[in-house]
Structure formats: C-alpha cells, structure tokens
Amino acid sequence: MNAERIPTFSVAELTTAVGNLLERGFAPRFLVEATVSRPQLKKGHLWLTLTDGEASISAVAWASQLSKLRYCPGDGDGVTVVGKLNFWAARASLNVQVLDIRPSLSTVLRQFELVRRRLEEAGLIDRARRRPLPRQTQTLAVVTSVPSSALADMLRTAAERWPLTRLLVVPIPVQGTVAIRIREVLGRLAKESSSLGLDALVLARGGGSREDLGVFDDEDLCRDLAAFPVPVVTGLGHEDDLTVADLVADHRAATPTAAIVALLPDRHVALRELQHQRQRLRDLKSRWLERQHQSLMKRRQALALQAPQRRLQELRQKLDQRRALLRALSPQRWLRQGLALVSNAQGIAIDGVAGIEKKDKLTLSFQDGSLKATVTQVRLQPPSSTS
C-alpha cells in the first residue's frame, strides 16, 4: 500500500471531516420511530435514549426547544421524533437533536386501556350513571379550540337546527399536553354552571390522528367530566376514534357536528310536528262539535216528543178511542135496536130471572123512556140438552 495515497488527518481534522460529510450527505430533518429509555432532565435539557430493541442512539431536547414540546415522554413510551443529527467534532459524539416528539399509537392505546380500567373500577364508566340529555336546551356550552373548522360546523348546524339556543363558546387547547389547562376551564364552568343557566356541555375536537386525541385519555380530566354538574356530550375526532372521555360522557357523538344534532332539535321537524298537532286539534274540535250536534238533535227530538201540543194530541186520540169504545159498549146502542134494560127496585141491572120473585118491582128502560112493572109470574128456561 502506498502511504502517499492514504490521507492523513489529525483527530480534530478527522472529526471535522466526518461532521462535514454527515452535514452534506444526511437529511436535515427526519422522523425516528422508537421507544424511549431512561429520560432525564439535566440543566434544563431533556436527555434520553432512543431504541428499537436492536440498536440505540442518544437524543436531546434542548431547554429552548423543550418548552415548546406538547408532549414529554416517560420511560418505555413509544414515540415518533422529529429530529436532526448533531455531531460534536471535539468528542466525535453523535446524537439526535429533538425538534418535536409525539407519542406513538401503541403508547396512546396503552394509556387508554390503563385509564379505562381504573375508571371502570371506580364506577365512572357505567351506562347506568349516564344522565338523559335535556329535551329543550336553552343554554349550551361548547368547549373546543377557537378558531377551528369543527367550531364553524357546530355553529352553522346550531343556527340551522335551533337558533333559539344560546351557545357559550369556551376556547381550549386541544393538542399536546394540555390536560391541566382544559381542567382549569372545566372547573370554572362547573362553578358557574348554575349562574350561567347551562343545560349541557359539548367537548369537541375536529379530526386528527388517534395520537392527537391522547389528551382526552387523561385520568384526572376524565374524572372532571364524569363529575360535571350538567350532562356532557363528546364529539372528538372521527367516528372510529374512541377516548376515555367518550366513555365517561353522558353521550358520545361520532363528530362535533353530531354532538350538536344530539342536543338540538330540528326546527323543520318541530314545525311539521306542530302543524300535525294543530291539525289533530282541529280534527278533535270538529269531531267534538259533531258529537255535540248529534246529541243536541237527539235531545231536540226527545223534546219534540214531549211537546205540550203533541202530548195533548196523544191524549185527545186516546180520549177519542175510549169514547168510541164507550159508545160501542153503551146500553143506548142496544136500546136503539129495540132492547130494554131491566133493573130491580134498587136500580141494579138484572140479566136473568134468577133471584126474581112474584110481586118484585122492576123498571124497564127503553130508548125513549121507561116503565114500572110488577112481576106476576117467574118462568125458568129449561136447560138445553146436548146430543
């Protein structure tokens, strides 16, 4: 080997050359998916080791950058790091400078399961404790990020469905390690809920990854939601996303807009229902009037049957019938046919010779007068024989 062809470096020159090579040949920023090991703060800087089980590399989040991070990992957390390479030429030391760091899905799901189990054991995740939503929401607190597309959709939907409801928009941060700030807002709302006249609360966040929703798996935050004095409706992320906050809420909506739909009636549907009820009342009134009219007609007919003129007419007819009957049965009718009415001295009509004796005084009445007679002979009619 020709020694003249092999470059010669001092240590400083060598490490500087390596640094230059890395600077020119490696991406200025990159993503690393790893598990955090032994994170620790030193002089305001966060030092940690990133590993995938086969290899590891040191990483650091400088104090100036650490204050901007929305998530601080713990030992064993899965993370996605946005970083760049740092090479110290003086010590030929290589590490990853952390520009941003987020929990991986596995970390988020592990936290979800841990908190869910704790709250189930505490009885806070139970269908039986869910409160019914108000039928008429007069005042609704909307807790979400401001401004946001989710808020715009909710405001538009509320105006379309039921503009009479008063909306109190309460801004909160929804990204990163912001559970404490959200709890502060909820605490103030809980204290003032009565004076504000709150009927319900909506906790909403627009779309994002499941990792972005990790704040809503915070145990203390979820306990505050479970203890909130009015019914809570969550509309967090997409339909497939499920957080612990959804489990402790009184109602879980698939989206922020769906949360508004769950709480506010549709004014067009309400109008149709009112029109239907109005028609039913009209129909009931018409049927009632018809029944009253029929009842009145029956009473009028009954009264007509009991009218004095009609009653007099009926009595006159009965009298005429009796008069005709009397005429038919009157003795005068038989007297006019040549018969006579025989009565004894006491004026009692007799119809046979039984009990009549000689010298009895009898009166015979004819059509045109009467005469007195004395019985001189009584002759009994022999009984007729039958064959």
Image (tube, rainbow, N blue to C red):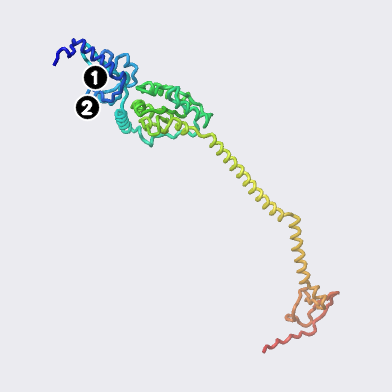
Local SS, label 1: strand
Quarter holding residue 8: top left
Q: Position of residue 124 (x, y in %)?
A: 35, 32
Choose top left, top right, bottom left or bottom right for residue 267.
top right
Res. 75 mark: none
Position of residue 359 measured from the top left corner of the image (x, y, whole percent): 79, 81
Could you tell me the amino acid type at mark 2? Gly
* Residue with the mark numbered 2: 53
State the image coordinates of residue 2 (x, y, percent, origin top left).
Answer: 14, 14
Q: Is residue 361 above or below residue 307?
A: below
Labelled disc at residue 58: 1
Q: Is residue 309 or residue 227 the one in the foreground?
A: 227
Q: Nearer the viewer, residue 221 or 352?
A: 221
Q: Mark 1 or mark 2, which is nearer the start of the sequence?
A: 2
Give the image location of residue 335, x and y in percent. 81, 75
Locate residue 367 relative to residue 105 in the image: left or right: right
Residue 275 left/right relative to 202: right
Quarter in which the N terminus is drawn: top left
Which residue is farthest right? Answer: 368
The relative height of residue 364 versus residue 132 in the rendered view (above or below) is below
**Is the C-beta separation of discs 2 and 1 under 8 Å?**
no
Q: Name the residue: 44% across, 24% down.
A: 148
- Residue at 73% x, 54% y is 307
Residue at x 41%, y 24% (from the top left corner): 186
In the rendered view, tell whether residue 152 sits above or below residue 287.
above
Rounded to the nearest whole Å, what is the CA distance between mark 2 and mark 1?
A: 14 Å
In the picture as drawn, the residue positioned furthest to the left comes out as: 1
Secondary structure of residue under mark 2? loop
Towards the viewer: 10 or 360: 10
Residue at the farthest bottom position: 387
